[in-house]
Amino acid sequence: MDPIISQQPEQLPTQPHKHFLNKKFAITLVILLLLGTGAYAGIWYWGNQQQSGVYTFEECVKAKDSKMLETYPEQCVTSDGKTFPNPDQTASEPPVSGNVPADWKTYTNTQYGFEFKYPADFHINEGIDYKCTDQNCLNVVITNGTRSYGILINSPELKRKSSVTEQVFYNGIKITKSPYDKGTLYEFSNGKNLFIIATVSDSDYFYNQILSTFKFTISNPSQTACTQEAKLCPDGSAVGRAGPNCEFAACPK
């Protein structure tokens, strides 16, 4: 009798279990998410550290994600909420009206209808210069020989450089302030003439004192005093300037 040989069933190649593949994918995904979160946190921390080192307006302007506020003075705000005003546009608060030394002198201009007080050791120069190119313009300079401060009337040369403005009042006069180079531009009008002051940062307080005493002396701008000039007429008579535009009166017929 032939011996009985038992045969083992043929072993087929084993296939990875589908559940094992899903688990491996999930672990890989978790690792990637952790790495991404860690990278983001590192970047955020680095950026926050950079912002925490901002201590001035200039540093704020250069800092990442900082923003400028449309105010006067300009203000820069960092991403973590720190606020820095522009030091070149920060002017002293206007003093109480007329709160100047008792020995200050008074300057009065009847042609343009205004007056203001100025320090006793200063004097006034007035005239037409490079900032005033026509007869309707006047530059009133307050000077002590070392320092000079000017008030321009109807100057075609001095113009506003910024759209950022602030409205303030001195003696009831509405004045528009705006940034100008490293200082401030002051603009105000009596309805006929435009008054302009351009300052540098260290002269704002002086101008604030001057403006605290500034007043218009002609309530109706159309009644501006005219210059005392005369026009010779054909009949030998003379006429002067009159009217709201200070034109020569008509000669007798």
Image: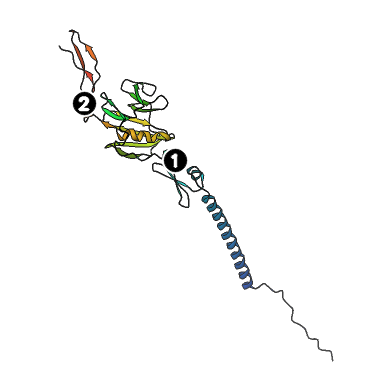
Q: How many marks?
A: 2
Vertical placement of residue 10 versus 98, above or below = below
Residue furthest to the left? 253
- Secondary structure category for the residue under label 2: helix
Instruction: Residue 190: tell me if it is visible.
Output: no
Quarter that holds the N terminus? bottom right
Judged left or right of residue 135, residue 88 is: right
Mark 2, residue position: 223
Vertical placement of residue 49 versus 250, above or below = below
Quadrant of the rendered image containing residue 178: top left
Q: Position of residue 143 (x, y in %)?
A: 38, 26
Q: Position of residue 97 (x, y in %)?
A: 29, 37
Amino acid type assigned to the residue bearing label 2 in the image: Gln
Q: Residue at x 36, y 33 (%)?
A: 207
Judged left or right of residue 180, residue 19 is: right
Give the color scheme: rainbow, by chain, secondary structure or one colour. rainbow
- Secondary structure category for the residue under label 1: helix
Q: Residue at x 61, y 67 (%)?
A: 27
Q: Nearer the viewer, residue 217 or 118?
A: 118
Judged left or right of residue 70, residue 238 is: left
Quadrant of the rendered image containing residue 108: top left
Instruction: Residue 238: tell me if it is visible.
Output: yes
Q: Nearer the viewer, residue 163 or 18?
A: 163
Amino acid type assigned to the residue bearing label 1 in the image: Pro
Q: Nearer the viewer, residue 120 or 117?
A: 120
Mark 1, residue position: 87
Vertical placement of residue 34 versus 173, above or below = below
Q: Position of residue 223 (x, y in %)?
A: 21, 26
Q: Position of residue 153 (x, y in %)?
A: 32, 27
Front of the two marks 1 and 2: 1
Residue furthest to the front? 103
